[in-house]
Amino acid sequence: MRRRAFLTLLAGAGALAASGCSTVADARADRGSGVIVNYVASFEQMWTALPAVLAELGLKVAAENKTEGTILVEQGAAAFSWGERVAVIVERIGTRGHTRVEVVSKGALGVNLTATDWAKPIHEKLAQRFRRL
């Protein structure tokens, strides 16, 4: 009986984890659904500043692609969260050295209702360095 209960619990936990998982690729695929803010900063200025901004918030860069303008971040599990996946997308806008920054923040598990939405803190830190449009 104990073995059956254990196997049932194990199967349920695996199904829950697999059914609601969010990967870093999912965060990037959700481009257009995040919080977008335009800044008075060149692409190079923004790209150079972002790693420091993310580090100040305790976020670890998992991957970056300057050509695509994408930085992918993973935040591990904490007391009230199973972790988050964040995509920061930087785009050049116009010819006056302005950029558009989109932050797509997703919980690592779809059932994670307490996951932190990192868009606001990231944009607040960027606004301390660059003027918003």
Image (spheres, grey):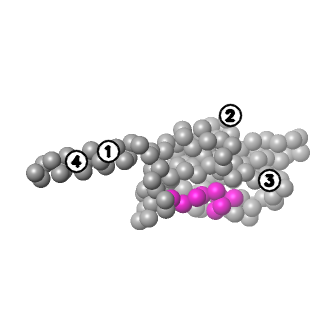
Question: In percent of the image, x 24 and y 50: which residue is there?
Answer: 9
Task: Find residue 68 and report its image quarter.
Answer: top right
Residue for badge 1: 14
| Three-letter amino acid code of the residue under disc 4 | Thr
Residue for badge 3: 39
Q: Nearer the viewer, mark 3 or mark 4?
A: 4
Question: In percent of the image, x 64 and y 62: which residue is there?
Answer: 121
Q: CA distance from mark 2 to mark 3?
A: 19 Å
Question: x, y (%) of residue 33?
Answer: 66, 46
Cβ–Cβ below 8 Å for labels 3 and 4?
A: no
Q: CA distance from mark 4 to mark 2?
A: 46 Å
**From what the image shows, is residue 18 above or below residue 76?**
above
Q: Is residue 121 magenta?
A: yes
**From what the image shows, is residue 94 above or below residue 53?**
above
The mark nearer the N terminus, 3 or 4, is 4
Q: Nearer the viewer, mark 1 or mark 2?
A: 1
Confirm whether residue 64 shows in the render: no
Residue for badge 4: 8
Question: In percent of the image, x 54 and y 56: which residue is there?
Answer: 59
Q: Secondary structure at mark 1?
A: helix
Question: x, y (%) of residue 29?
Answer: 60, 38
Q: CA distance from mark 1 to mark 4?
A: 10 Å
